Image: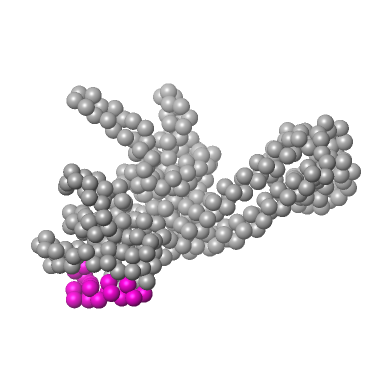
């Protein structure tokens, strides 16, 4: 006998019910608080049954379920997380009534679990969740840092407009050092510590560039005063503060991903941060039965419209994690630079008349299929096997 447990997750309390494989409602509409006492009451309800006979499912609701997940694992129970969209679609197929309550949702989840293959949680639960938290925090910090980079660039356009054509990277370490120390064109025109700048740039900032920059500053048409200097110094300080917060996160992500050592790291162009983001958003890739499900999870599969004899593919559905799609798109761009096979595939799609973004989306799909194959079969990337 299998007992199906559906749990509806919310911030302060959870609702659950138990249905037997004979469709008998064993426990109906039981609520418990999101605390130690509540979790223990759930455990008391589950104790009469063998752990091997209990299948538990709840919707993927972000961090609200994490403590419950860890509690279940520590007490020897497995569970399965389900996309809320799947539960919604399942409910629509069973009833036209629009009944939406926590108690009704727990029953719907339990009934869905009865009809679906049970795919219990991965042993990497806590590690994956930690990695996801770090990657998302990093992404948010970088987005905030970018705002101040734009503000700094806008201010420099007024105070030193000739600077942007001179530096390929407006927010390079070398430029930030120069601006932090000299701030305006008057001071830059008289700067003398070339050796410090050369060492900081690892020799890339030559003396010729040093002299050219001083000459540009001397003849600049830019306008600056104490207010402009204050804003530039402030934006640089804030930008560096973000760097000081992002660097430790990068190191921690690097430590974790090296320990996990996913096979996708063997693909030229995929670095530790990209691999960490992809892995943390997907979770245990071995839980996916095929690569098409990975595409659907990322929202990269095309919508299909069919009516009578007419059928055509639409745009990408874009369901799932936007963080994941962003990481895959960036990885695809990097892979194009380092893998001839992927670049040839991109050119093939362009030759078929597809624009850059559409061709890139095909590269993303190919990349996901390759990642799935590497992780599922536990093998390294071999370009000679790429079709």
Decide whether the magenta segment is chiefly helix, strand or loop.
helix
Q: On screen, 300 above or below 59?
A: above
Q: Is residue 50 magenta?
A: yes
Q: On screen, 352 above or below 164?
A: above
Q: Which of 177/383 is in front?
A: 177
| Residue at the image position 25 percent from the left and 64 percent from the top | 16
* Residue 103 appears in the figure: yes
Residue 5 occupies quadrant: bottom left
| Residue at the image position 41 percent from the left and 60 percent from the top | 63
Residue 169 occupies quadrant: top right
| Image quarter hosting the C terminus | top left
Q: Which of 330/160 is in front?
A: 160
x and y, in percent, of residue 98 in the image:
22, 46
| Residue at the image position 83 percent from the left and 47 percent from the top | 182
* Residue 69 appears in the figure: no
Q: On screen, 386 above or below 279?
A: above
Question: How is colour applied across the structure in the image?
Answer: one colour
| Image quarter hosting the N terminus | bottom left
x and y, in percent, of residue 345 in the image:
43, 33
x and y, in percent, of residue 88 in the image:
26, 48
Q: With 90 as the anchor, is 375 left or right in this view?
A: right
Q: Is residue 198 magenta?
A: no
Residue 58 occupies quadrant: bottom left
Q: What stretch is highlighted in magenta?
A: 36-55
Label count reads 0
Q: With 351 as the anchor, is 165 left or right in this view?
A: right
x and y, in percent, of residue 335 in the image:
50, 42
Q: Which of 311/196 is in front?
A: 311
| Residue at the image position 36 percent from the left and 49 percent from the top | 373
Q: Which of 309/89 is in front?
A: 89
């Amino acid at each position: 006998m299998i007992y199906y447990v559906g749990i509806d997750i919310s911030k302060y309390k959870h609702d659950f019910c138990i249905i037997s494989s004979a469709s008998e409602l064993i426990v109906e509409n039981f609520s418990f608080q999101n605390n130690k006492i509540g979790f223990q009451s759930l455990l008391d309800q589950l104790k009469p049954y063998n752990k091997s006979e209990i299948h538990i499912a709840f919707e993927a609701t972000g961090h609200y379920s994490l403590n419950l997940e860890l509690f279940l694992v520590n007490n020897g129970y497995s569970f399965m997380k389900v996309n809320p969209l799947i539960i919604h679609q399942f409910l629509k197929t069973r009833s036209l009534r629009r009944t939406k309550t926590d108690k009704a949702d727990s029953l719907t989840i339990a009934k869905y679990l009865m009809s679906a293959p049970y795919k219990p949680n991965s042993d990497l639960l806590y590690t994956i969740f930690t990695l996801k938290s770090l990657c998302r925090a990093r992404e948010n910090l970088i987005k905030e840092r970018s705002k101040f980079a734009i503000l700094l660039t806008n201010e420099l356009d007024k105070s030193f407009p000739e600077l942007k054509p001179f530096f390929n990277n407006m927010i390079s370490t070398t430029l930030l050092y120069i601006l932090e120390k000299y701030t305006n064109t008057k001071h830059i025109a008289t700067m003398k510590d070339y050796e410090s700048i050369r060492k900081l740039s690892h020799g890339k900032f030559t003396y010729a560039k040093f002299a050219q920059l001083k000459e540009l500053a001397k003849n600049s048409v830019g306008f600056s005063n104490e207010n402009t200097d204050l804003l530039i110094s402030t934006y640089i300080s804030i930008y560096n503060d973000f760097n000081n917060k992002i660097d430790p996160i990068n190191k921690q992500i690097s430590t974790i991903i090296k320990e996990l050592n996913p096979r996708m790291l063997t693909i030229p162009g995929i670095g530790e941060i990209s691999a960490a983001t992809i892995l943390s958003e997907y979770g245990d890739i071995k839980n996916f039965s095929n690569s098409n499900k990975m595409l659907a999870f990322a929202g990269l599969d095309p919508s299909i419209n069919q009516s009578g004899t007419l059928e055509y593919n639409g745009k990408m559905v874009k369901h799932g994690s936007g963080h994941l799609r962003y990481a895959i798109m960036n990885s695809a761009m990097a892979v194009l630079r380092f893998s001839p096979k992927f670049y040839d595939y991109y050119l093939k799609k362009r030759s078929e008349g597809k624009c850059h973004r559409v061709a890139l989306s095909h590269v993303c799909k190919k990349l996901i299929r390759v990642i799935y194959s590497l992780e599922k079969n536990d093998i390294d990337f071999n370009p000679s096997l790429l079709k």
